[in-house]
Image (cartoon, rainbow, N blue to C red):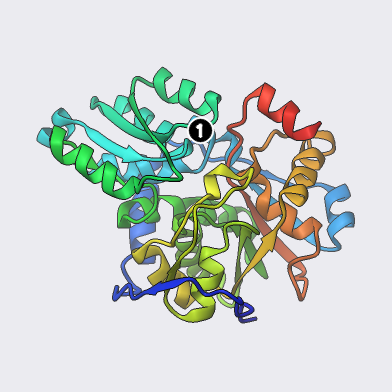
Amino acid sequence: MPPTTPTDPGTPTDPGTPADVVTPADIEDAAARLKGVAHRTPVLRSRTLDALVGAEVHLKCENFQRAGAFKFRGAYNAVSRLSRAELARGVAAFSSGNHAQALALAARELGSSAVILMPEDSPRSKKDATLGYGAEIVTYDRYNGDRADIGARLAAERGLTLIPPYDHPHVIAGQGTAARELIEETGPLDALVVPVGGGGLIAGSAVAATALSPGIRMIGVEPEAGDDTRRSLAGGERVRIPVPRTIADGQAVEQPGELTFAVNRRLVESVVLVSDDEIRAAMRLAFERLKIVTEPSGASALAALLAGAVEPLPRRIGVVVSGGNVGLDRFLELMA
């Protein structure tokens, strides 16, 4: 199902990037590196959820991953490949929170250090966790600053290796191990529904899933205010939008990555949108009925199913619950 063409396509740019930047073999290699390091997260089933959705739903619960989100997979896979000299100098990243925590933990595990550029308005809980893993935080104004540019300058000035949150082949391959685990456990699926920020998770997931479950439909989910990937797929080239204002801070991205878009334009069927209220409803159901805590970004794929946004409805569906990094005060505020 092709995505609907948006009324405002934004500003296009041409990635000019090969689509095979990540292969199934890369994901297998990442899985070997992550074995015994990353958690093999549970796959949750619920008769109540199946009845609400009208399909057989398998939730891959990355909210139980180390550092609270799928991001640890890609961060560790990337950092583990650095030389001793690079590890000694340290790593850098720009992130709204989950990649920040993941990279800080990966660096600590591998005997390195991390400097993270984070938005001033990142959730307090994510900043605290990043500091707790031993990283240094540098803040910026996400609405008036270009994080990629600031992050690159910061890394260059300090001699650090920059590990971006999604536009990196080893990061993408690491993220794909979640879908690999899911399909190993469930067998072939008719569709896999995945939250989309910069596109690394769905790109890695698509490479893994289409290899293991031929014919699977790859469906991305973005918040209504942050539909850059949907617009880009509709137009056939990357577009940039204003910084999204949404409760799903992990999906508040202006433009898909070059590498991720090259993969996703080939393997992703469509991207559907959910409102902040639909995300809140999914978080509430996950807490009250499934007994799991999700952050807004982590609940967006579930929200799409509950809102009836996935059409036609597949019979057996995988859903990635991408993270659970939300503080108690913020969770209660969102549920109020």
Residue at figure coordinates x 31%, y 57% from the top left: 169
Amino acid type for the residue under numbered disc 1: Asp
Image point 46% across, 25% down: which residue?
Answer: 127
Q: Nearer the viewer, residue 174 or 152?
A: 152
**Image spot of residue 290 (x, y percent):** 79, 39
Q: Which residue is mark 1?
A: 121
> Quick one: 276 or 47, which is closer to the camera?
276
Eyeballing the image, is 336 above or below 10?
above
Q: Nearer the viewer, residue 63 or 11?
A: 11
Packing grade of label 1 (10 A; few <14, some 14-19, many >=20) is few
Q: Quadrant of residue 315?
A: bottom right
Specify whether 206 is left or right of 19. Answer: right
Looking at the rendered structure, the secondary structure element under dot 1 is loop
Q: Quadrant of residue 34?
A: top left
Residue at (42%, 18%) from the top-left corner?
Answer: 132
Query: How far across and how far down the image is residue 180, in percent?
Result: 51, 56
Residue 117 location (% of width, % of height): 34, 35
Give the x, y percent position of residue 227. Answer: 57, 63
How many numbered marks appear?
Answer: 1
Q: Report the residue at 48% width, 53% height from top.
A: 253
User: Which quadrant of the structure image shows residue 144?
Assistant: top left
| Quadrant location, the C terminus | top right
Q: Is residue 135 above or below residue 47?
A: above
Q: Left or right: 143 with respect to 86?
A: right
Q: Is residue 139 left or right of residue 304?
A: left
The image shows residue 194, relative to residue 10, as above or below, that is above
